[in-house]
Amino acid sequence: MKILILGVNGFIGNALVRRILQDTPWEVYGMDLSCHKLEHSLDSPRFHYVEGDISINKEWIEYHIKKCDLVLPLVAIATPRAYVKDPLGVFTLDFEENLRVVRQCVKYGRRVIFPSTSEVYGMCQDEEFLEDESNYVLGPIHKQRWIYSCSKQLIDRVIWAYGQRGDLRFTLIRPFNWIGPKLDDVDAAKEGSSRVVTQFIINLYRREPIKLVDGGHQTRCFTWVEDGIDCLMKIIENPGGVADGQIFNIGSPDNLCSIRDLAVRLKDLFMRHPDHAEDGVYSEIVEEPHELYYGQGYQDILNRRPSIEKARRLLGWEPRTDLDSALKDTLDFFLEEMKDQD
Ligand code: UDP
């Protein structure tokens, strides 16, 4: 099988290509703006990496969509700070650029696995979000946080409509707060624009206060990236077409944790880490209103927990990694990385 991965240097892309090369005979063609997360795969003769921008290198992309059996368009801006600061950039990249790729998959009859998001459920009040039943609840237009959710929802609907018409073989995946090595670039976290786990780890390392937005009562289910990749591999394998036309939540419902609890756990792991047990001075945990942390365009999601019954039933998948192991391994990775950078 030949697979095209756009955004191959991203958090999910790099972990996926590594697994594919390790466990299968498949070939991967990949494009991204840089390749700093791909050092583990660049030497493989089955990995063909090209540096490029999906909004510029359109011919290369079209040619490779034709050439490959499966397309994973993973290019997206997926950090809440960017939704508020650069809503049009989010729309252009996450919706417009990806729509072109989806349409080319239709044109050439190629299968696509598209990354939707747990964000599409928005402020849904269900205890567990169900792919085919839960409602999507978004705030008013001036709360620009929702442009990401809304862009992804619309592209989900477009893909679904092409599928209904019999013009596209697709699967939509919805990752729920995946964490692990290479989650975000350390420099993004230094500016305060990375996802919460990386942000707290970098705050701890730099002895900066850990900021709990609006008190940190909101919850998330943090999912170990390799568990998520296990599920994605089953979807790619797709025995008997079981994943065709389906939407899958991919997350660890048992790893539900409030942001406050996350801060306490990470601080505790940091204080017990052999390199830092003797530091003496550690970050304080403080509270900050969202208007100050993110700006007026932000609105939070209070609870976000997936139902993974469908992935269990159709794919026989089960997440295996508990929260503390996932946090510890993520922390250890970033502490090593920052030590190397000092
Ligand atoms: N958050 C926080 N402090 C930070 C960064 C994030 O309290 O320094 C909160 C944020 O308000 C949200 C949660 O942590 O409720 C998860 O944020 P993340 O950026 O990881 O993305 P999300 O899960 O909202 O997509």
Image: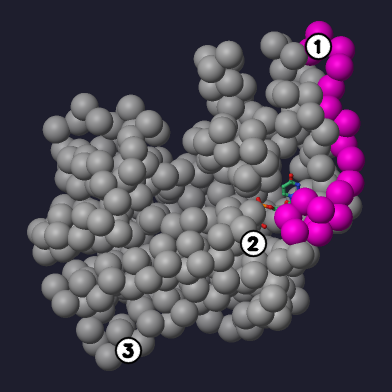
Dot 2 amino acid type: Val
Residue 241 in sight here: no
Foreground: disc 2 or disc 1 = 2
Residue 67 in sight here: yes
Foreground: disc 1 or disc 3 = 1
Task: Name the spot of residue 8 as percent of width and height, x first.
Answer: 33, 46
Task: Name the spot of residue 210 as percent of width and height, x first.
Answer: 80, 37
* Residue drawn at point x = 74 percent, y = 14 percent: 276
Residue 199, compared with residue 297, is above or below; it is above
* Residue drawn at point x = 20 percent, y = 31 percent: 44
Badge 1 is on which residue? 279
Secondary structure beneath label 1? loop
* Residue drawn at point x = 14 percent, y = 60 percent: 59
Task: Name the spot of residue 95 as percent of width and height, x first.
Answer: 42, 70
> What's the distance in space between the residues labelled 2 and 3, CA to CA?
33 Å
Task: Name the spot of residue 49 as percent of width and height, x first.
Answer: 22, 40
The reply to whether the magenta stretch includes residue 93 is no
The scheme the figure's colours follow is one colour
Q: Which residues are magenta?
A: 277-295
Residue 71, compared with residue 37, is above or below; it is below
Dot 3 amino acid type: Gln
Badge 2 is on which residue? 84
Badge 3 is on which residue? 164
Residue 12, compared with residue 277, is above or below; it is below
Question: Reading the chain from its start, which is encountered first: label 1 or label 3?
Answer: 3
Residue 81 left/right relative to 315:
right
Residue 137 left/right relative to 54:
right
